Image (cartoon, rainbow, N blue to C red):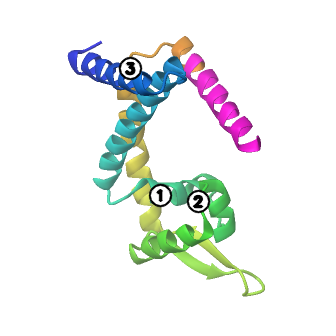
Amino acid sequence: MNFEANRKRDEVDMRVRKLAEHFPQLEVRCLRTMMFYIHTTHEVYNEMSGKLSEHGLSVGKMKILMPLFVYRKSLTPSELAAYSGVTRSTMTSVIDGLERDGLIKRASLNDRRMTAIHLTEKGMELINTTVPAYASFVAGIMQDFTEEDHETLVRLLHKLSDGLERFRNS
């Protein structure tokens, strides 16, 4: 582990210890793990956002462009919202921006009451350029992971997701 990573880990440990002094009932181990997880995911997200912005994109825009690219068909805003995990109101503003950028087009479906969204040629070209750069970024930050590390992280993230779902349902 490099110096910067050690410093960040020590900083998280110090913050958790300070909190525990004021709140002895805290699950220190859980809080420390979650704080380090949040810090790391925040850093990854920021780097990923920076890489995407080099191509004029954002994470939100990619969440809409990727299903259109993968499924190679027009999708309704509701379908895109479901695939992307964003609200319809967020979807509308992102779609407006993507359309202004010439990356997608709106078209009416059969009964004209529903709108379908599809990628333009410009959008296809941008995805074809961006995905390899993004994949290279991901591979670079995960280059020290073994196959077992990947499986372990996915298993742990599933457990975290299950815990969140349990909390939401309680």
- Residue 152 lies, with reference to residue 50, above or below; the image says above
Q: Quadrant of residue 127?
A: bottom left
Secondary structure mostly seen in the magenta stretch: helix
| Residue at mark 1 | 60
Q: Report whether 167 appears left or right of 32.
A: right
Q: Residue at position x 43%, y 73% from top?
A: 97
Are there few (<14), some (14-19), or many (20+) residues within 10 Å of tag 1?
some
| Residue at mark 2 | 86
Whether the magenta-drawn stretch holds residue 68 is answered as no
Magenta range: 152-170
| Residue at mark 3 | 17
Image quadrant holding the C terminus, namely: top right
- Residue 121 lies, with reference to residue 48, above or below; the image says below
- Residue 16 lies, with reference to residue 119, above or below; the image says above
Q: Report whether 1 appears left or right of 152.
A: left
Single out the residue that lies furthest toward the left: 3
Question: Where is residue 167 drawn, in percent x and y?
Answer: 70, 38
Q: Residue at position x 38%, y 72% from top?
A: 101
- C-alpha gap between disc 2 and disc 1: 9 Å
Does residue 152 appear in the picture of this structure? yes
Q: Quadrant of residue 134?
A: top left
Image quadrant holding the N terminus, namely: top left
Question: Where is residue 10 drawn, in percent x and y?
Answer: 30, 18
Question: Nearest the camera: 73 or 88?
Answer: 88
